Image (cartoon, grey):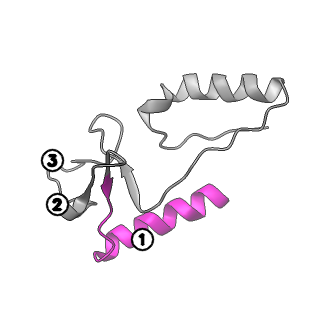
Amino acid sequence: MSVLIKNGCSRYGTPDELKELMDEAHRRGITVLLDVVHSHACKNTVDGLNQFDGTNGCFFHDNARGFHDLWDSRLFNYTQYARSVYALSIRIFKVA
């Protein structure tokens, strides 16, 4: 089974480490399912979209509404056309 890791969260390790884990699981007959949530994203600045352009508002709400404290993540601002197109492109990419 081929696996394409486009933008996994660092909480899974590096993309290569995640691929190794998935390959080993598949060798052992274990199916791997990852949770994909399109309403929010990792707030890490190293591997995520948070502060992609140096601001809090590039892809996310630029106020308290842009932070989800319980999930330790950022919430997308879908009122901006470009953000909606980005989210839709992820869905198409993941399904294709």
The reply to whether callout 2 and callout 1 are in contact (CB within 8 Å) is no
Residue 17 vertical position relative to residue 55 in the rendered view, above or below: above
Q: Nearer the viewer, mark 2 or mark 3?
A: 2
- Please indicate whether residue 79 sits to the left or right of residue 4 in the image: left
11 is within the stretch colored magenta: no
Earlier in the chain: of badge 2 and badge 3, it is 3
Q: Position of residue 51 (x, y in %)?
A: 21, 48
Q: Position of residue 32 (x, y in %)?
A: 71, 38
Q: Amino acid at mark 1?
A: Val
Q: Residues within 10 Å of mark 1 (few under 14, many from 20)?
A: few
Quadrant containing the N terminus in the rendered view:
top right
So how many labels did they put on this image? 3
90 is within the stretch colored magenta: yes
Label ID, residue 54: 3
Q: Secondary structure at mark 2?
A: helix
Label ID, residue 64: 2
Label ID, residue 21: none
Q: Position of residue 6 (x, y in %)?
A: 52, 43
Q: Nearer the viewer, mark 2 or mark 1?
A: 2
Q: Amino acid at mark 3?
A: Gly
Earlier in the chain: of badge 3 and badge 1, it is 3
Q: Nearer the viewer, residue 63 or 1?
A: 63
- Residue stretch rendered in magenta on the structure: 74-96
Q: Residue at x 44, y 65 (%)?
A: 87
Q: Amino acid at mark 2?
A: Ala
Q: Residues within 10 Å of mark 2 (few under 14, many from 20)?
A: few
Cα–Cα span, label 3 and label 1: 21 Å
- Please indicate whether residue 8 sits to the left or right of residue 43 in the image: right
Q: Residue at x 48, y 25 (%)?
A: 13
Q: Secondary structure at mark 3?
A: loop
- Residue occupied by mark 1: 85
Earlier in the chain: of badge 2 and badge 1, it is 2
